[in-house]
Image (cartoon, rainbow, N blue to C red):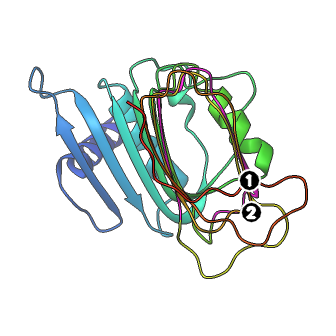
Amino acid sequence: MRNQDRRRGIMTNQIRRSSSKDVVATSAISKRSRSNVESLQLKLNPNNSRQDFKDLVNYAVARSLRELRIEMLYKSFEFPQSLYLYPQLETLILEKLSLVDIPSNVSLIGVKKLHLLSVRFSSDESVTKLLSRCPLLEDLVVRRSTYTNVMVFTIDVPTLKCLSIDNTSGKSRPEGVHGFVINAPSLRCFSIKDTFSNYVRFGDMPELVKASVNIVCDQPIPTERETVQSTSSKM
C-alpha cells in the first residue's frame, strides 16, 4: 500500500508541475474541483516507458479528462484501454508519433476534435479505421510531414464540420500517387494548403460556408488528377 500511495503521489506531482526529468506534463485543473484534470499535455522522450504514460493517462481519465495532447518524439503509440468508450474526452491531439491501429471492437466515442500532426500510420487504411472510430468527430486538423508515410489520406467522415489540412512541409515529394480523398457532406469550414500532392479529390459539400483552397499539384497523373490553385470563400 505504501508503494501504491507513493506512486500516486509521484503521478500527481508530474501532472501539477510544468516539467519533470523524463516527462513534461501540464494540466488545467477544474475550477470546480481541484481533483479534476480537464487538460493534459504529455511530451515523452525515448527514456519513458509505456507504463509511465499509461499511469498518467489513467490518472487523468479518472479525474474527468476532456483534452489530451501527446507528443512522443517519433515513438510508437498505442491508446490506453482507459480511453476506449470514455465519453468525456472531447479533444485529442497527437503529434510526432507512430500510431498503432485501434482494435475494431472499440471506439473513441466522445472525441469531437482530432489533430493529427506529423503522425505515422501502419497503412493508408489505418487512417480510415481511426476516423471511423470517432463517431462524433466534428473538427479535424491534419498536418503532414516527411515522417508521415500515408500515400492517399482518405477522410470519409459524415459528421465532420470543420477540416484543416497542411501539406506544405517536406524536402521532396514521394513517388507514386499521393494526396487526399475527402468525403465530408456536413462540412461547413474547409482549409487546405498543399504543395506536395498529385491527387486530390473532393466529394460534394452542400453545407460549405467558408473555404480556403491553395493546392499546387506536381506532375499530372493521366485520368486521375485534379489541379487546383485558388483561394475562395462561399458565404
> Secondary structure beneath disc 1?
loop
The answer to which of 107 and 225 lies nearer the viewer is 225
Mark 2 or mark 1, whichever is nearer to me: 1
The answer to which of 220 and 96 lies nearer the viewer is 220
Q: Is residue 185 visible?
A: yes
Q: Where residue 192 sits: x, y (%)?
A: 51, 51
Residue 165 part of the magenta segment: yes
The quarter of the displayed image where residue 128 is located:
top right
What type is the residue that disc 1 sits on? Glu
Q: Where residue 150 sits: x, y (%)?
A: 72, 57
Mark number displayed over residue 162: none
**In the image, 190: left or right of 10?**
right
Residue for point 61% across, 45% down: 78
Q: Where residue 82 sits: x, y (%)?
A: 51, 28
Position of the C terminus by quadrant: top left
Residue for point 64% across, 68% down: 196
User: Compared with residue 7, is residue 215 higher up or lower down, i.e. above or below?
Assistant: below
> Secondary structure beneath disc 2?
loop
Earlier residue among tags 2 and 1: 2
Q: Which residue is mark 1?
A: 226
What range of the chain is rendered magenta? Answer: 148-167
